């Protein structure tokens, strides 16, 4: 009986020990399985500041870019508006000034100009009359010069085809020109009172086609023969234009 009791006690002890070992093993397993769960739950925490940190520069950068674009646009608009306005004002002012200037300019006369006349080789029997502005302001050479060769009782007619599109304005120190055909090249006007002379007087016309100032004596270097075909052109800005007719 004693041996039976000892064996039962030993078996109980073994079973108790096994139960204790099993309990300890179960506890250890539970502890091991809980540890990864706790890590996973805390893992996102350090990632939030990381996300926030990357988002902050993006937020800071975006407004800076918008502000820069805004400034650039405003600057461009201001510059463009200022420029166009300035050019417009300048252009209109220049046009108005030109209009005022054209109506307020004096008439070219013997008081503010110098007259010279020279013979030319081509066309034949032609002379070039030059008026040079000796004043300090531009002047208008209206219509055509009034010529009187010698003791002529009338002035020569003007070549209407030579009429320019606008009044010829002569700036200080600059010149305008008129062509003079003294006689016909084929002699057709020689039998109608042609004559030779060294005297020439030139007069100017105003905007109303009235005489402007006194006649000016223009010296001739030699006798000039004139006949009934004597004509003169309108004042021209170019020498070649004056000698075309």
Image (cartoon, helix red, strand yellow):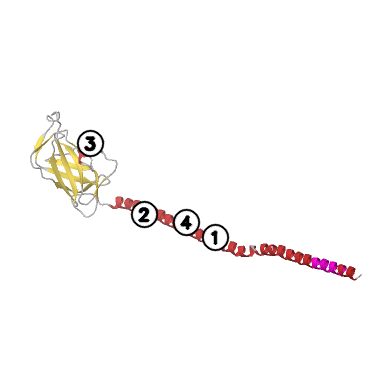
Disc 4 on helix, strand or loop? helix
Q: Which marked residue is nearer to the observer: mark 2 or mark 3?
A: 2
Instruction: Classify 72 as above or below 8.
Output: above
The residue that disc 1 covers is 58
In primary-sequence order, the first of circles 4 and 1 is: 1
| Quadrant location of the C terminus in the rendered image | top left
The stretch drawn in magenta includes residue 11: yes
Q: Which marked residue is nearer to the observer: mark 3 or mark 1?
A: 1
Q: Is residue 13 left or right of residue 151?
A: right
Q: CA distance from mark 4 to mark 1?
A: 23 Å
Instruction: Classify 92 as above or below 231.
Output: below
Q: Which mark is residue 90?
A: 2
- Inspect this view and state whether residue 155 appears: no
Q: Which marked residue is nearer to the observer: mark 4 or mark 2?
A: 4
In percent of width and height, residue 195 lies at 10, 35
Q: CA distance from mark 2 to mark 3?
A: 40 Å
Per the rendered image, the range of residues in magenta is 8-19
In primary-sequence order, the first of circles 2 and 3 is: 2
In percent of width and height, residue 87 lies at 38, 53
In primary-sequence order, the first of circles 4 and 2 is: 4
Q: Which mark is residue 73?
A: 4
The residue that disc 3 covers is 159
In primary-sequence order, the first of circles 3 and 4 is: 4
Disc 2 on helix, strand or loop? helix
Q: Contact, CB < 8 Å: mark 3 with mark 1?
A: no
In percent of width and height, residue 42 lies at 66, 65
Residue in front for this viewpoint, 146 or 19: 19
In primary-sequence order, the first of circles 1 and 2 is: 1
């Amino acid at each position: 009986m004693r041996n039976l009791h000892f064996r039962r006690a030993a078996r109980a002890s073994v079973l108790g020990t096994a139960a204790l070992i099993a309990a300890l093993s179960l506890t250890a397993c539970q502890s091991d399985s809980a540890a990864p769960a706790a890590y996973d739950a805390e893992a996102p925490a350090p990632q939030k500041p990381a996300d926030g940190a990357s988002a902050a520069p993006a937020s800071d950068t975006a407004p800076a870019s918008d502000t820069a674009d805004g400034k650039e646009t405003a600057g461009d608009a201001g510059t463009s508006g200022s420029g166009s306005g300035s050019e417009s004002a300048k252009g209109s002012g220049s046009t108005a000034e030109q209009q005022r200037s054209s109506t307020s300019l004096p008439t070219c006369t013997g008081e503010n100009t110098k007259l010279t006349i020279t013979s030319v080789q081509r066309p034949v029997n032609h002379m070039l009359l030059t008026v040079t502005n000796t004043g300090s302001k531009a002047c208008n050479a209206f219509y055509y010069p009034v010529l009187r060769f010698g003791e002529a009782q009338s002035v020569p007619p003007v070549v209407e085809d030579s009429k320019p599109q606008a009044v010829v304005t002569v700036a200080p120190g600059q010149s305008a020109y008129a062509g003079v055909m003294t006689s016909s090249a084929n002699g057709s006007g020689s039998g109608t009172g042609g004559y030779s002379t060294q005297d020439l007087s030139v007069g100017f016309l105003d905007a109303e086609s009235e005489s402007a100032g006194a006649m000016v004596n223009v010296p001739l270097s030699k006798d000039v023969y004139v006949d009934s075909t004597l004509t003169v052109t309108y004042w021209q800005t170019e020498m070649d234009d004056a000698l075309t007719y």
